[in-house]
Amino acid sequence: MLNTIREHHLIKKNQHIVIGLSGGPDSVCLFHVLLDLAKEWELTLHPVHINHRFRPGAAEADQSYVERIAQEAGCPCRTFVYDCSKIAAEEKITSEEAGRKVRYQSFAEVAAEIAAKGVRRDNIKIAVAQNADDQVETILFRILRGVGTDGLSGISYRRFDEQENEIIRPLLDVCKEDILTYCREHDLHPCIDQTNLAPIYTRNKIRLNLIPYLEKEYNTNIKDTMIRMGKTAAVDKDYLWQQAADAFDGLAKEADATSVLMDGEKLRGLHRAVRQRVFAKAFHSIGLTEDMTFTHFDGCESIAFHQGPSARLDLPRGYYLTKVYDDVKAARGAPLANSDIKVTILSKGEYEEQKLPKDSHAVFDYDLLREHFGDDAAARITLRTRKAGDFIAIGETRTKKLQDYLVDRKVPKDERNSVQFAAVGREILWILPYQGRGRYSARYKLCEDTKKVICIEINC
């Protein structure tokens, strides 16, 4: 374990280690070894136990055991209790998924509390106890599900969660048999979860049935074979992702919290293996960190090479990929800007005295508007997004369909429903500023004869 920590730079001296301590052999072994290391490296350990309430009675016994050994070690345990069966039913996920979700949620909460006390985030690690046998099970599980080559790399030694907490796995090179031997030699008496001994979950079936069968019928060293394959795949994965990161930096033209616009020509010039990782990186940067499948990446390929200027592919949770003329944009649906308008009727002189900043308002001749829309013209002005039949006056007698105006301005198709307008009925008076200055109706402009105005201001 110490060799793994050093080789992969998992822990440094004087750091805070949040430890997932279930009470089973793996986590108890991890805790015991880190206790020894803490003395030499001056580590501060923060054991965390999650009671999932899956096994009434046994779960409470596990909790009591963990809290006792942590207290005896001088590291009080932080315990979280969840009804994971209820969470799974409410969120329509498996009980295993619910358990994993609350575990990492709890670890992140403790890490945040430590950071709030002034500890730098890079000096806080979350240590979990997956071992070499877990690695084999994971790789086989992913093969059975038909994952891509990245999945063959199995569990990584380190990763970052959505809060940028670093999660580490110091036991990943240690097999289960050695962990059990260690626990016996040090008289640790960990808890045994009886559900792990029954083939009721897919992973249990792989561990209890598939691996022994493969060892007996095909390869007595199947575990070592799987681990070697995982390490080879991990090297290839690291290289391809580095290529994708470099490519992404060179083709991202615009980026914000909800979208990334990528140079289409450069994107299409990449090797598909790199391009697909660029798609993943683009979506990851705006919040889609999972749920991308082979079918989704295949669809992304189709969009990137589509001849149309606005082809679109919808992805999970409101994310999508779309052509923007020759370029390609990864985006997620964003709520409309929380804007409102204030409509006032003023004399021309009062309006001029205010010296309102450009693009924060629009002003029109009151009498011309009243003549066209009636005495309640000001009350009929509303802020909204586009509707079928909308138009704007581009001259005293000439109008243009709003759809044509947006196309001429090269507003991407997927963004046209986000542009806001001040309108009366189907006639647009003011297209609020979007990617530059706004546009005003030419039909109701101020002139020398203007006495009163209707002023429309943006309130954000």
Image: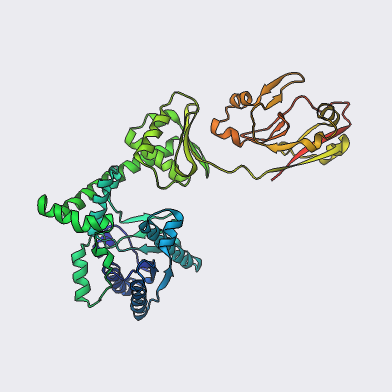
Q: Residue at the spot x=38%, y=32% of the render?
A: 301
Count of numbered tags = 0
The extreme bottom residue here reads: 72
Query: Quick check: can you spot residue 378?
Result: yes
Colour scheme in use: rainbow
Q: Position of residue 404 (x, y in %)?
A: 62, 23
Q: Residue furthest top?
A: 397
Picture coordinates of residue 345 (x, y %)?
84, 38
| Relative vertical location of residue 125 with respect to residue 368 in this rendering, above or below | below
Whether 103 is drawn above or below 189: the answer is above
Image spot of residue 232 (x, y percent): 22, 47
Coordinates of residue 192 in the picture (x, y in percent): 26, 70
Q: Quadrant of residue 79?
A: bottom left
Quarter holding residue 166: bottom left
- In the rendered view of the protein, which quadrant contains the N terminus? bottom left
- Residue at 43% across / 26% down in the picture? 306
Residue 16 visible? The answer is no
Which image quadrant for residue 131? bottom left
Residue 285 in the image: above or below residue 77: above
The one of 11 and 390 positioned closer to us in this rendering: 390
Q: Is residue 281 left or right of residue 233?
A: right
* Front in this rendered view, residue 257 or 201: 201
